[in-house]
Image: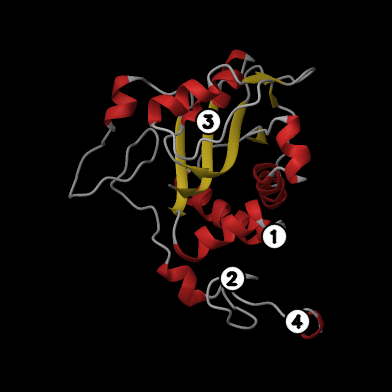
Amino acid sequence: MLDILYPRNCVQCGTSSPDALSHLCWDCLSDTPKIEAPFCVCCGDPVAGDIQHDYTCFACSRETPAFDFARSAVRYEGAVGAALRDLKYNNAVWMAQDLAALLLACIQAEYSEIDFDLISAIPLHPARRRARGFNQSALLASALARRMHRPFKKRATRRIRSTTSQTGLTAPQRAANVCGAFRTGLFTRLKGKQILLVDDVMTTGATANACAAALKRGGAETVYVVTVARG
């Protein structure tokens, strides 16, 4: 009845009542490249070629990230890329549930043996959040926490410095842009915790790394990162 009153369409091709997820059809979802091995064992960045051993990318070899591991479900392309852009820039908050399903599938594949104590999200600066009206990463983390039956700590970290958009910046510029931008939340107890840190898209990992560093300074034992897509 709800589909009659409020018809659902695939965000990519417009197919009515898509049967894969609420707003993604199987054809479009299957056309979105999945993140599969081989990839960096630390940050999860895919690498081309036939590699039969554990591989660590140049960036992680040069400087070990603050997070323990990072994994992503798909490439930032196709239907999922369109869904993420709709969520972030067109206020399509209803996409959070479909995207959380992809996050859960990634966790079941990559982090199945880890018992997370809590789930958190990359925070926005208060000014940016007021302008946008919501934090897309927090929406994803909250939806994922309900599926995993784990507590979601919205204020585990806070962004204490407003930063420019990471879009268009080089890897060193991205790292400098977010350096020192995060701090653990007030009255947040993180000592000895295993934390799952959620974001929408990971490109160079600079933002996730800076946020994970703040969580580690706050006492977190381990920080695992999961994102819907990899840029």
Residue 22 pos. (x, y %)? 65, 71
* Residue that badge 3 annotates: 207
**First reached walking from the N terminus: tag 2 or tag 1:** 2
**First reached walking from the N terminus: tag 3 or tag 1:** 1
Q: Does 103 sit left or right of 95 as displayed?
A: left
* Residue that badge 1 annotates: 92
Mark 3–mark 1 CB contact (< 8 Å): no
The CA distance from mark 3 to mark 1 is: 23 Å
* Render colour scheme: secondary structure
Which residue sits at x=60%, y=30%?
Answer: 195
Counting other residues with Cα less than 10 Å from the Cα at mark 2, is it few (<14), some (14-19), or many (20 or more)?
A: many
Q: Which of these two is toward me, 185 or 130?
A: 130
Mark 2–mark 1 CB contact (< 8 Å): yes
Residue 173 pos. (x, y %)? 43, 26
Mark 3–mark 4 CB contact (< 8 Å): no
Circle 3 SS class = helix
Residue 3 marker:
4
Instruction: Tell me if residue 18 comes above or below residue 65 in the rendering.
Output: below
